[in-house]
Image: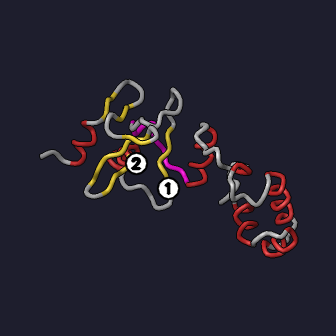
Amino acid sequence: MSTFEERFWAKVDKTDGCWLWTGASSKGYGYIRSGKKNRIAPQVSWELAHGPIPTGMCVLHNCPDGDNPSCVNPSHLFLGTQGDNARDRNAKGRASSRVGVNNGRARLTERGVVVVREMAGQGMTHKAIGEYLGLHESTVRYAIVGKHWSHL
C-alpha cells in the first residue's frame, strides 16, 4: 500500500515550470482525499516541502508564467495572510462579481466606504459613525478594517 505522500506525487505532472495537479479538482484547484477529508493540493505540497502551514496563513501562487491554480510546485508557492490572499485573488481577476455594490446585502457604496474611513480617521467611533449614517456599528467596523470592501 502506498503512503499519502506517494499517492499525492503520483497525481503530479512535473514539468520544467509548473507542476500540474492531474487528480480531482474544483474551480481549477486540485484536491486529494486524506482520511475523511479533502485537502487542497497546493497546501499539501507546501506542507510536504516546508512543514505545517502556520495558523492564520494561506498558501498562494506565484507562478512565473502567470496564475496557475493547478500548480503544486513548492517553489511557486508562498505564504500570506488572508488579506494577502484577497489582494492576490483580486489582482489576478479571481474575485467574485458579487463584491462591493454588486453584493445584494451591501449597505454602503464605494464612496460611502471612503467617507466612513475618513470619519474614522478623524477620530469618530464606529458607533458614532453608524448612528450618524444610519448604519449598524458592525457595518461601519467591517468597512473600516477591510473585512468587507477589502478590494478598496
For residue 20, side relative to residue 63 (left or right): left
* CA–CA distance in space, label 1 to label 2: 11 Å
The residue tagged 2 is 43
Helix, strand or loop at label 1? It is loop
For residue 56, side relative to residue 105 (left or right): left
The residue tagged 1 is 57
Q: Please identify the quarter of the rendering in which residue 15 is found.
A: top left
Please report whichever mark, 1 or 2, sits nearer to the chain's N-terminal start.
2
Circle 1 packing at 10 Å, graded few (<14), some (14-19), many (20+), is some
**Residue drawn at x 35%, y 48% as measured from the top left:** 44
Is residue 108 part of the magenta span, yes or no? no
Verify CB contact (< 8 Å) between mark 1 and mark 2.
no
Whole-percent x and y of residue 119?
Answer: 86, 64
**Residue drawn at x 39%, y 36% as measured from the top left:** 73
Q: Please identify the quarter of the rendering in which residue 138 is found.
A: bottom right
Which residue is at the far top?
16
- Magenta residues, start to end: 73-81
Say what amino acid the circle numbered 2 marks: Gln
For residue 28, side relative to residue 2 (left or right): right
Whole-percent x and y of residue 88?
Answer: 59, 43
* Nearer to us in this view, 63 or 141: 141
